[in-house]
Amino acid sequence: MTTLQQATAQELFKEAFENRYTWDKDFPGYRAEITYFPKEDEGDVSFSGIVSIDRNMKIDVVSIEEEAIRQTVREQMWEIMVHRVRHSFDEEHGAHTFAYGEPPAPDVVEVLVGGPSATDRYWVKDKHIQMVHRHFTNRAVRILVQEFDDTGEGYLPMHYTAEYHSLESGERLGAKLTYEDRHQKLGCYWLLVERRIWEEQGGEKSSSPHLF
C-alpha cells in the first residue's frame, strides 16, 4: 500500500472535496456587466449585457436581445453557480461508497464511486480533484484540470479540458473544450471575471477562443 493510500478512499476524496473553493451560506449574490466575444470564425461581433446570481442562486441575463446568445451566457453563469454553491460532503455523497481504482500516475490516486453514481470516478492529487468522469443518460463527460488557483480559502480550477463521449459508441460528441479561467476576489468572495473557451476538432485547435 502506497503512502497516499494509508487513508481510505472516502477520506482522501472527502479531503479534496472539502478543499474546493465554494461560496458560504452568507453569499449575497452579485450583478455584473458581461461582454461576450464569439470565436473569430463566427463573425467580428460582440454582445454586452447584465448578468446576476442572487442569494438563492437564481440566474438572470438581461440586455442581450438574441436568444441564442443569451442562452450561451446563461449556460456559463449556470456552470459558475453549480460549482461554487456549497453543499456538505454528506449532502453530495452521503449515499455513495468509495474504493481505490488503478492509479494513473505514482502521485495520483483514482477513486471509484459505488452506490447511485457507480459509474463515476475521480483522480485526486495533493488534496485536489484533478479529474472528474461522470455518466449521464446517454453521454459521459471527462474533465481534466491542468492548473489550479489556490486562493488560501480553497482551490479553483484555472486551466482544464472537457470532453463528452457517447455511452453507446464511445465517440466524442462535439469539440474538445479547453477552459482558461481568471478569478478575482471582490469583497469577501472570489468571482470569475474572465473565461476563454478554445475548441478542438480532429486535432485542430480554433484560432481564437470564445471570450467572456
Image (spheres, grey):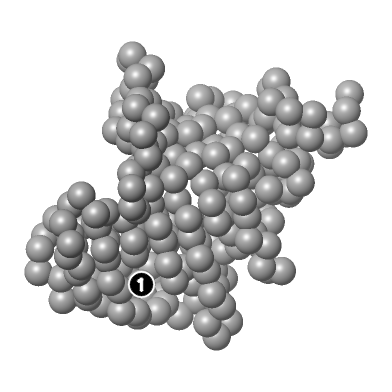
Q: Quadrant of residue 130?
A: top right
- Label 1 Cα crowd, 10 Å radius (few <14 / some 14-19 / many 20+): some
- Point out the image quarter for the N terminus: top right
Looking at the image, which residue sits at the far bottom?
187
Q: Residue 88, position in %: x, y?
A: 60, 55
The residue nearer to you, when weighing 45 against 88, is: 45
Specify whether 196 is left or right of 58.
right
In the figure, 63 relative to 132: above or below?
Answer: below
- Tell me which residue sits at (84%, 35%) in the image: 4
Instruction: Give the labeled residue for mark 1.
Output: 53
Q: Is residue 142 visible?
A: yes
- Tell me which residue sits at (27%, 66%) in the image: 36
Q: SS of the residue at dot 1?
A: strand
Q: Residue 73, position in %: x, y?
A: 27, 61
- Tell me which residue sits at (18%, 62%) in the image: 44
Q: Quadrant of residue 184?
A: bottom right
Q: Residue 112, position in %: x, y?
A: 63, 27
Specify whether 172 is left or right of 6.
left
In the figure, 169 relative to 25: above or below?
Answer: above
Q: Amino acid at mark 1?
A: Ile
- Point out the image quarter for the C terminus: bottom left
Q: Is residue 139 visible?
A: no
The residue nearer to you, when weighing 132 against 86, is: 132
In the figure, 127 relative to 164: above or below?
Answer: below
- Tell me which residue sits at (52%, 46%) in the image: 160
Looking at the image, which residue sits at the far top?
169
Q: Quadrant of residue 109?
A: top right
Q: Residue 127, position in %: x, y?
A: 74, 48
The residue nearer to you, when weighing 71 against 106, is: 106
